[in-house]
């Protein structure tokens, strides 16, 4: 079976136990029997579409690929142990996080903020969280909002400015949010 994937998905494909695949830079999956791609990627090739924003999504994607291709996943216990403190906060920590109101720009950030247990709002946020590429836009409303929020504006690296390895990328983003949002003004 000819499997193609993208650089963003490559590590998850490997962790799912797939040993034979081709990494395509250009999303041209012609000739592939199967493409393993991010959920938003358009393709006419039969595909497994995955999400890699939260730790839960990463683990589910690994399970999904492994189940579909009947491969044996690589040993994940160390990863789960390393990242367990980021996933599904409980008790007092979750109660405290629910009190922190966060406005987000970007679906990938929304998923992470929700996973961490913070409250999403549209008005009167304690924090504004936005992807780094928004600073480069010429949208004066967003730029003014970022400027107005000052230290309560939190910039998150987008795919082009984050590690390709999905667990390292998620850890970096969770760390930023943990360090900034848990310091309620």
Image (cartoon, rainbow, N blue to C red):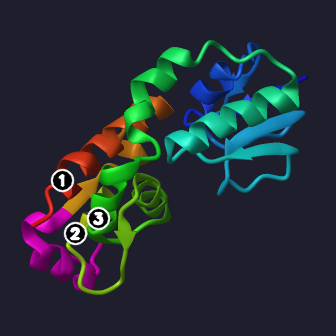
**Which quadrant of the figure contains the C terminus?**
bottom left
Rendering coords of residue 37 (x, y %)? 69, 43
Q: Which of the 4 quarters of the picture holds residue 69?
A: top right
Label 3 to label 2: alpha-carbon separation: 6 Å
Identify the residue at image location x=44%, y=63%.
110
Q: Is residue 150 magenta?
A: yes
Q: Which residue is mark 2?
A: 127
**Residue 71 location (% of width, % of height):** 81, 18
Q: Nearer the viewer, residue 22 or 181?
A: 181
Which quarter of the rendered picture does the N terminus lie within?
Answer: top right
Quarter where residue 172 is shown:
top left
Q: Position of residue 112 (x, y in %)?
A: 44, 54
Classed neighbour count for the residue bearing mark 2: other residues with Cα under 10 Å, few (<14), some (14–19), many (≥20): many
Callout 1–callout 2 Cβ contact below 8 Å:
yes
Q: Main secondary structure of the magenta part?
A: helix
Residue at point 30%, 87% (across, down): 123
Question: Image quarter for residue 13?
Answer: top right
Q: Earlier in the sequence, mark 1 or mark 2?
A: 2
Q: Would you name the residue on which mark 3 appears?
A: 129
Q: Is residue 43 above or below residue 67?
A: below
Position of residue 79 relative to residue 136, above or below, is above
Crowd rating for badge 3 (residues with CA inside 10 Å; few <14, some 14–19, many 20+): many
Q: Is residue 164 visible?
A: no
When the figure is inspected, residue 165 is found, relative to residue 52, above or below; the finding is above
Question: Tag 2, which secondary structure?
Answer: strand
Say whether disc 3 or disc 1 marks the residue closer to the N-terminus.
Answer: 3
Residue at the spot x=22%, y=57% of the render? 181
Which residue carries the number 1 mark? 180
Determine whether label 3 and label 2 are within 8 Å by CB.
Answer: yes
């Amino acid at each position: 079976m000819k499997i193609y994937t993208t650089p963003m998905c490559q590590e998850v494909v490997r962790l799912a136990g797939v040993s034979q695949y081709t990494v395509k830079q250009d999303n041209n999956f012609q000739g592939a029997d199967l493409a393993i791609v991010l959920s938003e990627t358009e393709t006419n090739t039969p595909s497994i579409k995955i999400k890699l924003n939260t730790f839960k999504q990463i683990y589910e994607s690994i399970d999904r690929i492994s189940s579909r291709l009947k491969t044996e996943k690589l040993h994940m216990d160390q990863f789960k142990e390393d990242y367990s403190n980021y996933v599904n906060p409980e008790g007092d920590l979750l109660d405290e996080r629910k009190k922190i109101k966060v406005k987000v720009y970007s679906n990938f950030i929304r998923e992470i903020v929700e996973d961490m247990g913070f409250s999403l709002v549209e008005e009167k946020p304690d924090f504004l969280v936005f992807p780094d590429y928004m600073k480069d836009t010429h949208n004066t409303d967003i730029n003014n909002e970022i400027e107005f929020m000052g230290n309560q504006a939190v910039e998150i690296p987008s795919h082009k400015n984050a590690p390709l390895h999905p667990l390292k990328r998620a850890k970096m983003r969770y760390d930023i949010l943990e360090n900034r949002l848990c310091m309620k003004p």
